[in-house]
Amino acid sequence: MKRFVVLVWLFSLTVAFAWSAHETLTYLIVKSTLPNADDLVEITPYSYNEKRIYNIERLILDDVCGRFMVNFIPSWAKFYPPDPAPINNKVPVWQVLTVYSVEPDLGMDEGLNLSPLQSIIGNSQGVRHMKYKLLFFDFFEGSESFLYFVEMSKQAFQRNDRYWGYRFLARAIHHLEDLSMPYHNAPGRLGDVLESLLWNREKGMELAYRHFSYDEYLAYLLYLEDQEAINSIVEAQPKRVKNMRELIQRVRLLGLRNLEDVDEIFVRVYPNLDRSLSWNDFEASAKQLEELKRITNHIMKDFSAYLKGFLLDFLTQVGEI
């Protein structure tokens, strides 16, 4: 039981975040893919009876377009999506998808009682935002979150509520993006995980710092307008899959297959990591991180291709394109 508690503690340290810059990643994908990205949709009130519970104090149901980016984007960012104010109570499709792709990270899933593991990890956001694979076992509900919001989006479009159709779709996009992040699929390489479980609690903190740091690395590339990173996203060609299960599997594999290489780079460049890294650290280590950049761009290229294929097929299915 003690080892199980430590394992779950390790999980709780590393699930607070996935990729940063959800809004910028989503913006680049949507604007380079959707033929109706500039179509205007009318802002409508929330009117849904959901199966999920949320932290009502942190749940945002009003429209925040035109007021979001200025308070969210870090001061050092050079590139990020525009965020114009609504005109005649209407906003473009790309803006709804961009702004609300961040929404699941703003607290709506925090402070809840969602799982039998809840009393141990104390982190309900992690329950809904990750899908760890450890040996032969999967933990938590990241893929279920994606599927849930796809279904909510379908319901909204069936009601001809285009605004909430796209807003629920933005939440689904967020969870699919989470599933592509290596450290959202496993806490680290198996040897390090076992070390943290059996005798070295500090190793768990080091794994957490690697997670947080890689999370910020994508933001570093996108916010500082790294052209190779942007091109890997914008130029990706849509990839189709047979069904949602295959989509989830392929996206998760992007993270799982690259975990060991990403982890090895962090160990080599930042041994004994004792804090989360910032963009200044990445700038100082740019030459040493060339392989990390290559891997990250590869993940982004393949992920963008899968998300583009999903968006085109889904929006065709619901009659939007």
Image (cartoon, rainbow, N blue to C red):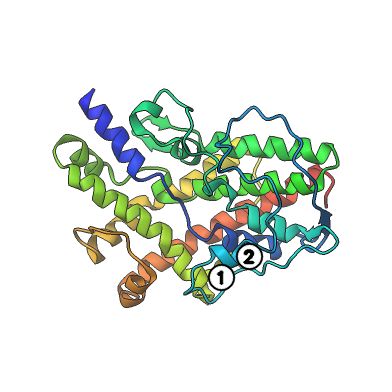
User: Residue at horizontal 55%, vertical 41%?
Assistant: 108
* Image location of residue 78, percent across then percent down: 53, 77
- All told, the count of numbered labels is 2
In the rendered image of this protein, does residue 2 appear above or below residue 28? above
Q: For the N terminus, which image quadrant? A: top left
Q: Amino acid at mark 2?
A: Leu
Q: Is 203 displayed left or right of 125 in the figure?
A: left
Asked if the residue under mark 1 is in contact with the one under mark 2, i.e. CB atoms within 8 Å, the reply is yes
Foreground residue, 157 or 74? Answer: 74
Foreground residue, 241 or 311? Answer: 311
User: Residue at horizontal 55%, vertical 54%?
Assistant: 303
Q: Amino acid at mark 1?
A: Ile
Q: Is 95 displayed left or right of 54 in the figure?
A: right
Secondary structure at numbered mark 1? helix
Looking at the image, the residue that sits furthest to the left is: 199
* Image location of residue 80, percent across then percent down: 58, 70
User: Residue at horizontal 50%, vertical 73%?
Assistant: 77
User: Residue at horizontal 20%, vertical 61%?
Assistant: 271
Foreground residue, 127 or 237? Answer: 127
Q: Earlier in the sequence, mark 2 or mark 1?
A: 2
Q: Which residue is mark 1?
A: 230
Q: Quadrant of residue 245?
A: top right
Secondary structure at numbered mark 2? helix
* Res. 191 visible in picture: yes
Gap between marks 2 and 1 measured at Cα:
8 Å
Q: Quadrant of residue 198?
A: top left
* Image location of residue 15, percent across then percent down: 40, 44
Q: Quadrant of residue 117?
A: top left
In the rendered image of this protein, does residue 177 appear above or below residue 269? above
Q: Which residue is mark 2?
A: 28
